[in-house]
Image (cartoon, rainbow, N blue to C red):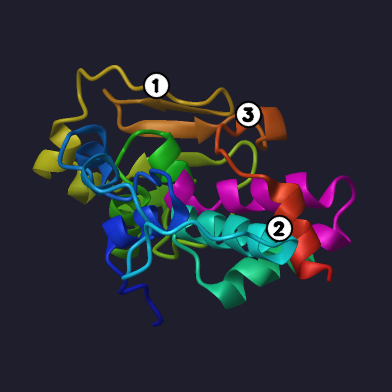
């Protein structure tokens, strides 16, 4: 299975903003964007003129890295969004947000998308009572997401109990029962990601 091997902090520096790939570390002074907020490489601090193509490419790369998706799969989301009714950019973001690893992250079960992807891959998440170990599985409105019964005694899940989790309005999660629900499909206004999706659409539609 293909996977990303580039250091997380290097990805944030390349995009010039925090992508919150390391969870809580990104909110501390240890974050690379706090210590050295320049593009990695010998000429990272030099100023360069960015073309229109460059802006589109960087926006696409930023979104891919934020969600931890490789190019082939990311393009498939765009192609599927084109076939759907409505605004292509909004459809694409909605599809990506509905990935199981992202939904687990939005519910607050893990500190980062990478951690949530690992939780899913290890078979610790159930959708409507059935174990799903595919991080790219697309959930739909009404789906019930829960921690697998025989995994609930793991310390990381015990620590969730009693916590006040902040979730977007399209999902809910009860840390006491370790069960959540997808209330609706996310709309663009429900997605707080700082992504200019129109630039990504322009990049792929060249």
Residue positioned 85% across, 55% down in the render: 84
Instruction: Kindly give the residue lying farthest to the right in the view shown.
Output: 85
In the picture of the structure, the residue carrying the numbered disc 1 is 166
| Predominant SS of the magenta segment | helix
**Which label sits in the foreground, 2 or 3?**
2
Question: Which of the pair 137/37 is nearer the observer?
Answer: 37
In the picture of the structure, the residue carrying the numbered disc 3 is 190
Q: Quadrant of residue 80?
A: bottom right
Q: Is residue 44 above or below residue 29?
A: below
In the picture of the structure, the residue carrying the numbered disc 2 is 200
Distance between the Cα atoms at labels 1 and 2?
A: 29 Å
Distance between the Cα atoms at labels 3 and 1?
A: 13 Å
Q: Is residue 49 left or right of residue 164?
A: right
Label 3 crowd (10 A; few <14 / some 14-19 / many >=20): few
Q: Quadrant of residue 196?
A: top right
**Which label sits in the foreground, 1 or 2?**
2
Question: Which of the pair 126/197 is nearer the observer?
Answer: 197
User: Per the image, is 94 magenta?
Assistant: yes
Residue positioned 57% across, 46% down in the render: 97
């Amino acid at each position: 299975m293909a996977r990303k091997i580039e250091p997380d902090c290097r990805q944030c520096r390349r995009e010039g903003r925090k992508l919150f790939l390391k969870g809580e570390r990104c909110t501390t002074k240890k974050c690379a964007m706090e210590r050295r907020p320049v593009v990695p490489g010998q000429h990272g601090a030099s100023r360069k003129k960015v073309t229109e193509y460059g802006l589109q490419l960087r926006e696409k790369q930023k979104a891919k890295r934020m969600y931890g998706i490789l190019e082939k799969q990311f393009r498939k989301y765009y192609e599927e969004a084109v076939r759907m009714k409505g605004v292509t950019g909004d459809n694409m973001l909605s599809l990506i947000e509905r990935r199981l690893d992202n939904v687990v992250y939005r519910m607050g079960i893990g500190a980062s998308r990478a951690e949530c992807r690992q939780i899913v891959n290890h078979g610790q998440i159930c959708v409507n009572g059935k174990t799903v170990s595919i991080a790219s599985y697309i959930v739909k409105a009404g789906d019930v997401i829960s921690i697998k019964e025989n995994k609930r005694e793991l310390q990381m899940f015990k620590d969730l109990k009693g916590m006040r989790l902040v979730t977007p309005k399209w999902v809910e999660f009860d840390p006491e029962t370790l069960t959540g629900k997808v209330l609706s499909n996310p709309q663009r206004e429900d997605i707080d990601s700082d992504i200019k999706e129109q630039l990504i659409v322009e990049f792929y539609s060249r």
